[in-house]
Amino acid sequence: MSGMVQGKAVVITGAGSGIGREFALAFAASGAKVVVNDLARNVETGVFAAEEVAAQIREAGGEAVANTDSVAEWQSAQHIVQAAMDSFGRIDCVVNNAGILRDRFFFNMSPEEWSAVIDVHLSGSFYVARAAAPHFKKQQSGSYIHMSSSSGLIGNVGQANYGAAKMGIAGLSKIIALDMARYNVRSNCIVPWAWTAMTSSVPINTPEDAARAEKNKRMEPKKVAPLAVYLASDAAYDTTAQIFGVRANEIYLFSQPRVMRSVHRSEDWTPETIAEHAIPSMRSSFFDNLPGVALTTWDPI
């Protein structure tokens, strides 16, 4: 078995199902040794989903171990990374994929729903990435791959917790790329469009929602995996601090915030002159208040 990540050791969180499972299988097929992390159990068998995926990799001739620690706590995140060190003697890549949804309109969202999503997505991404950092620094190499979302980069109705976490992950990835560049460590984001158990739980309230869901089923989770394998490979040595998207057979490169317009006066600004001059000068460049789905109106390719 050989491939672009031959011999590399990779930790993939949330790898018991959906996109994470496809990541684990693809990395293993390309020669990586995989820590399959997931704390969920198969509802039918009661077996940890991580162990089922790890067993599938081993049966195919690959190397994999299962880990069932939570990403949402500092100490358990240390155990996830240590599983790679104990099993494979090194760690070369972290894929921060674990996630949950607690969708609700902002004005109805509870503190518990907010914290649960932030803890897993944003804090979990930091904890696992941070646990790997000393090893990456010591070996002067490594790569991080984080899952962001158009819900954060653009916006989506009823996902204040999820969107805030995913926007935060984009910022986290960029700072990691800056801080770790001196150690030859890369950090990138993937924005995946895929039909999974998590995304299928989004409520369908209208015929339009139902029609969109049917189209979204074309976006198979396995189509996201090749980009992740590439980003972890040595071929991506000069690819860092980027945000990519995958939607069926399309790969996107997202823009990142930059100054677009500037206005100035010789005198200090006042609220009145801002209303009279600054805002009218910039209004033509304002972004519309639209959800992400309104900006990807074509069918998945």
Image (tube, rainbow, N blue to C red):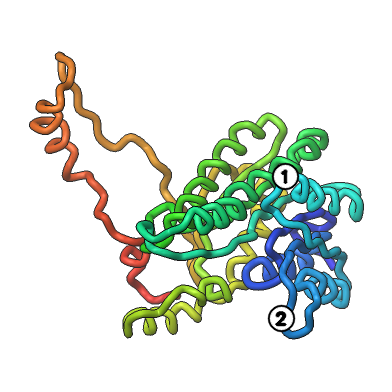
- Please give left or right for residue 31 compared with residue 234 in the image: right
Which secondary structure lies at badge 2? loop
- Residue 57 lies, in percent from the top left, at 82, 72
Which residue has dot 2 on it?
43
- Residue 166 lies, in percent from the top left, at 50, 52
- Image point (39%, 83%), residue name: 210
Quarter that holds the C terminus: bottom left
Which secondary structure lies at badge 1? helix
- Residue 31 lies, in percent from the top left, at 81, 63
What residue type is disc 2 on? Val
Residue 280 numbered tag: none
Residue 136 in which image quadrant: top right
Crowd tier of the residue under label 1, counting other residues whose Cα lies within 10 Å: few below 14, some 14–19, many 20 or above: some
Crowd tier of the residue under label 2, counting other residues whose Cα lies within 10 Å: few below 14, some 14–19, many 20 or above: few
- Residue 38 lies, in percent from the top left, at 73, 64
Distance in Å between CA atoms under marks 1 and 2: 27 Å
Q: How many marks?
A: 2
- Image point (64%, 66%), residue name: 225
Residue 55 in which image quadrant: bottom right
- Please give left or right for residue 199 compared with residue 256 in the image: right
Identify which residue, 46 or 14, lies in the foreground. Answer: 46
Residue 74 numbered tag: 1
